[in-house]
Image (spheres, rainbow, N blue to C red):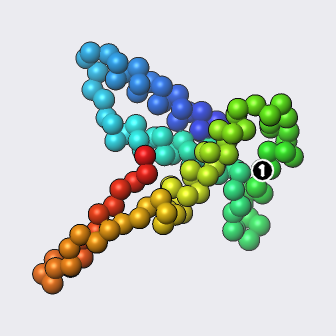
């Protein structure tokens, strides 16, 4: 969680820099850091197939993470789902591609759009 917090703080710093007139802002860096934040945050909450070498999955109920049923539980679920379907496992429903050309000289070309 400390690493996820570091990424969140970095995003906040980039947002502050973007708002200043003299700052240079890298949009691709912001997206990459956001993706890293999601992956790192969700990691403890998903199963790992490591033959018992990785830390066991953290179950929020076991550590009473959301005892008060707050909106953070909904956000947590959305982040873990986003990690599983759009970032790490690239669910076909979220990452559908379409054939653009089938050219003998250049091969296949596919159009791909990342879910926003």
Residue 71 placement, left or right of 28: right
Question: Residue sitting at 71 percent across and 61 percent down?
Answer: 47
Residue 98 placement, left or right of 47: left
Residue for badge 1: 58
Instruction: Note whether 33 is above or below 101 in the view shown.
Output: above
The quadrant of the rendering that contains the N terminus is top right
Tag 1's secondary structure? loop
Q: Position of residue 108 (x, y in %)?
A: 24, 76
Q: Position of residue 49 (x, y in %)?
A: 69, 68
**Residue located farthest toward the left when viewing the structure as drawn:** 105
Question: Residue sitting at 28 percent across and 68 percent down?
Answer: 110
Instruction: Please tell me in which quadrant of the rendered image residue 64 appears.
Output: top right
Instruction: Please tell me in which quadrant of the rendered image residue 104 appears.
Output: bottom left
Residue density around tag 1, few if under 14, some if 14–19, many if 20 or more, within 10 Å = some
Instruction: Please tell me in which quadrant of the rendered image residue 25 appears.
Output: top left
Q: Nearer the viewer, residue 6 or 97?
A: 97
Q: Position of residue 51 (x, y in %)?
A: 74, 71
């Amino acid at each position: 969680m400390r690493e996820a917090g570091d990424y969140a703080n970095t995003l906040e710093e980039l947002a502050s820099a973007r708002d200043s007139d003299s700052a240079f802002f890298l949009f691709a860096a912001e997206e990459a850091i956001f993706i890293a934040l999601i992956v790192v945050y969700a990691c403890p909450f998903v199963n790992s197939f490591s033959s018992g070498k990785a830390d066991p999955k953290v179950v929020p109920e076991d550590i009473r993470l959301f005892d008060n049923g707050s909106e953070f539980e909904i956000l947590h679920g959305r982040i873990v789902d986003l990690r599983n379907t759009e970032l790490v496992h690239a669910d076909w429903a979220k990452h559908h591609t379409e054939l653009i050309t089938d050219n003998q000289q250049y091969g296949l070309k596919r159009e791909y759009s990342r879910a926003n």
